[in-house]
Amino acid sequence: MSEGFDSAAFRRATDVSRETLDRLEAYAALLVKWQRSHNLVSSATLPELWRRHFLDSAQLAPLILAANPAPRCADIGTGAGFPGMVLAIMGVGGWTLIDSDRKKLVFLQEAARVTGVSVKLLPSRLEAMEGVIADIVTARALAPLGKLLGYAAPLLAAGGSAFFLKGRDAGSELAEARGQWSFRAETFSSATDPEAKVIQLQDIARAVPGH
């Protein structure tokens, strides 16, 4: 991955408007500023911020819109807002960003103010989420797939989809998750890592023993 992938390269890759890019640049600048006192992302990834975090998040936009053009979305374990805040700034659905780290939610509250984006911030442990119903659930670098499905399944509305950004072990995680869950899965190549995958899951249910 090249350190030369900047906001201009991001715009060429995603075709976002100048106004949207301005908001994303404001978000990026705030993240870099807060990173000095908060552990928002791995510091080693800052030179690759626009590819490693922003483009990685943005690649979900066309997949989500193909699944539902006006979705209610929930980003579980959102951390510094990837992918949910990026997608909210891009105008993809209405977002609830969920994380148990209140310091990160304070950052996201300020990011929403600076960028003028409306998001709902929910301070909750994933095991204790209540009152959230979503057409789309996303997660990135959070947990193994089988565990992610336990978090996502109770939130999904009928006909909803989960989108998970996964690394080189995506195939083995899918195979292992099928021991506990039934689902329809489709995988897509990652725009940022040749070894990574985006996984879309639908019709998620606990597997019935013996079937």
Image (cartoon, rainbow, N blue to C red):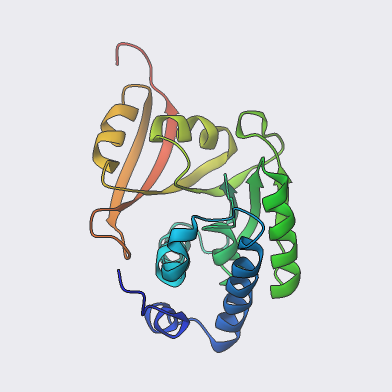
- Count the numbered circles shown: 0
Q: Is residue 191 above or below residue 97?
A: below
Residue 173 image position (x, y, % from top left): 31, 35
Q: Residue at x 57, y 44 (%)?
A: 77
Q: Residue at x 36, y 29 (%)?
A: 182
Residue closest to the far bottom: 18
Residue 133 place in picture, x, y as percent: 64, 42
Using the image, determine if residue 37 lies above or below residue 112.
above
Q: Nearer the viewer, residue 178 or 52?
A: 52
Classify residue 12 as left or right of residue 188: right
Q: Quadrant of the C terminus?
A: top left
Residue for point 32% across, 42% down: 185
- Relative placement, left or right, of 129 versus 9 is right
Relative to 105, 50 lies left or right: left
Front residue of this view, candidates 170 and 34: 34
Q: Residue at x 24, y 54 (%)?
A: 195
Using residue 81 as the reference point, say whether residue 130 is left or right of it: right
Outermost residue to the front = 36
* Residue 32 drawn above or below residue 152: below
x, y percentage for residue 41? 53, 56
Q: Picture coordinates of residue 12 (x, y %)? A: 39, 84
Residue 8, compared with residue 101, is above or below; it is: below
Q: Quadrant of the N terminus?
A: bottom left
